[in-house]
Amino acid sequence: MEAQFTLVEKEDVGTFVFPHEEVLKTEEESKLLENQLDRAISLGNLEHQKVRIYFEDAKKKMVIETTIWAVTDTAIVLKQNSIIPINRIYKLEI
């Protein structure tokens, strides 16, 4: 799966356009992502540990390595208030 994703810098996230469609197709995948998000926010807040975020905008699949500062019902917030919608995230690697 990783070979399909282009590594990008966190500073570029603000330039991406995110469609409203979900990238995950099953309830099981969504539950796994939810668990990964819970763990990532805890590690980010406590230990400032970086995670790899695999996501897709309107044009291509990308991966970024950064710390997650906050999680809302619909998005994750990175440093510099960059936002990635949760419905566009495939997975996290912690």
Image (cartoon, helix red, strand yellow):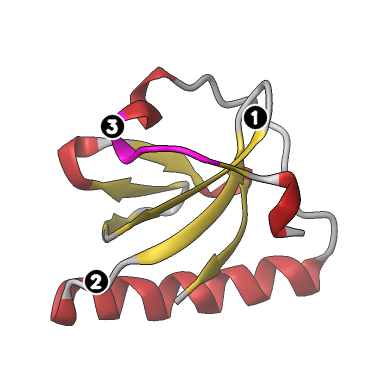
Badge 3 marks a residue whose secondary structure is helix
The percent position of residue 80, horizontal first and vertical second, equals: 16, 37
Badge 2 marks a residue whose secondary structure is helix
Label 3: which residue? 11
- Name the residue type under label 2: Gly
Residue 73 appears left or right of 68 = right
Residue 17 appears left or right of 12 = right
- Point 36% across, 53% down: residue: 72
Q: Quadrant of residue 57?
A: top right
The answer to whether residue 53 is magenta is: no
Q: CA distance from mark 2 to mark 3?
A: 18 Å
Q: CA distance from mark 3 to mark 1?
A: 22 Å
Badge 1 marks a residue whose secondary structure is loop
Residue 20 appears left or right of 35 = right
Label 1: which residue? 20
Report the number of discs. Answer: 3
- Looking at marks 2 and 3 on the same chain, the residue that comes earlier in the sequence is marked by 3
- Looking at marks 1 and 2 on the same chain, the residue that comes earlier in the sequence is marked by 1
Q: Nearer the viewer, mark 3 or mark 1?
A: 3
The percent position of residue 62, horizontal first and vertical second, equals: 58, 41
- Point 19% across, 46% down: residue: 79
Q: Can you see residue 13? A: yes
The percent position of residue 51, horizontal first and vertical second, equals: 39, 66
The answer to whether residue 9 is magenta is: yes
Label 2: which residue? 44
> Where are the magenta residues, as a range?
7-11
Residue 62 versus residue 72 in the image, above or below: above
Residue 88 versus residue 34 in the image, above or below: above
- Point 55% across, 71% down: residue: 34
- Name the residue type under label 3: Glu
- Looking at marks 3 and 1 on the same chain, the residue that comes earlier in the sequence is marked by 3
Q: Nearer the viewer, mark 2 or mark 3?
A: 3
